[in-house]
């Protein structure tokens, strides 16, 4: 598990995240890359989740895991100190969801 190097997606440079030897992005990153309102990718994910395969198209990553990977300075922990899991999209998950942005 590591975050390093910059990659370009949709013409924007972002920090590459590797999880279980696969490049992944977060739903928030997807919103930023496509200049969508915050929560757009998350809503699309839940609308299409039945078509996505866990551990192939996405990973649900516990707080204890993702806090080691991501720069947590910029991530707000929910009120009350709740530390939630985070969804990481693989390339196939990203491609399936991004299609819904243009459908």
Image (spheres, grey):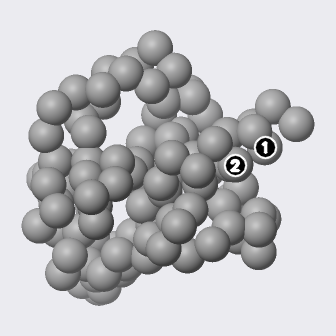
Q: Which mark is residue 96?
A: 2
Which dot, 1 or 2, sits closer to the camera? Answer: 2
User: Which residue is pictured at 43% across the width and 76% down the height?
Assistant: 60
User: Which residue is pictured at 28% across the width and 66% down the height?
Assistant: 20
Name the spot of residue 38 as percent of width and height, x first: 54, 45
Q: CA distance from mark 1 to mark 2?
A: 7 Å
Does residue 60 appear to the left or right of 35 in the view shown?
left
Relative height, residue 51 to residue 93 (above, below): below
User: Which residue is pictured at 63% across the width and 42% down the height?
Assistant: 95
Q: Residues within 10 Å of mark 1 (few under 14, many from 20)?
A: few
User: Which residue is pictured at 48% across the width and 56% down the height?
Assistant: 89
SS for callout 1: helix
Relative height, residue 92 to residue 49 (above, below): above
Residue 51 visible in the picture: yes
Cβ atoms under marks 1 and 2 closer than 8 Å: yes
Name the spot of residue 11 as percent of width and height, x first: 46, 14
SS for callout 2: helix
Report the number of numbered marks: 2
């Amino acid at each position: 598990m590591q975050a390093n190097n910059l990659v370009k997606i949709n013409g924007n440079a972002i920090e590459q995240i590797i999880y279980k030897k696969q490049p992944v992005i977060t739903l928030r990153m997807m919103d930023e890359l496509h200049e969508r309102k915050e929560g757009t990718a998350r809503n699309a994910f839940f609308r299409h989740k039945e078509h996505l395969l866990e551990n192939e198209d996405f990973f649900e990553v516990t707080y204890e895991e993702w806090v080691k990977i991501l720069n947590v300075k910029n991530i707000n922990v929910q009120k009350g100190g709740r530390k939630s899991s985070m969804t990481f999209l693989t390339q196939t998950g990203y491609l399936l969801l991004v299609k819904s942005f243009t459908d």
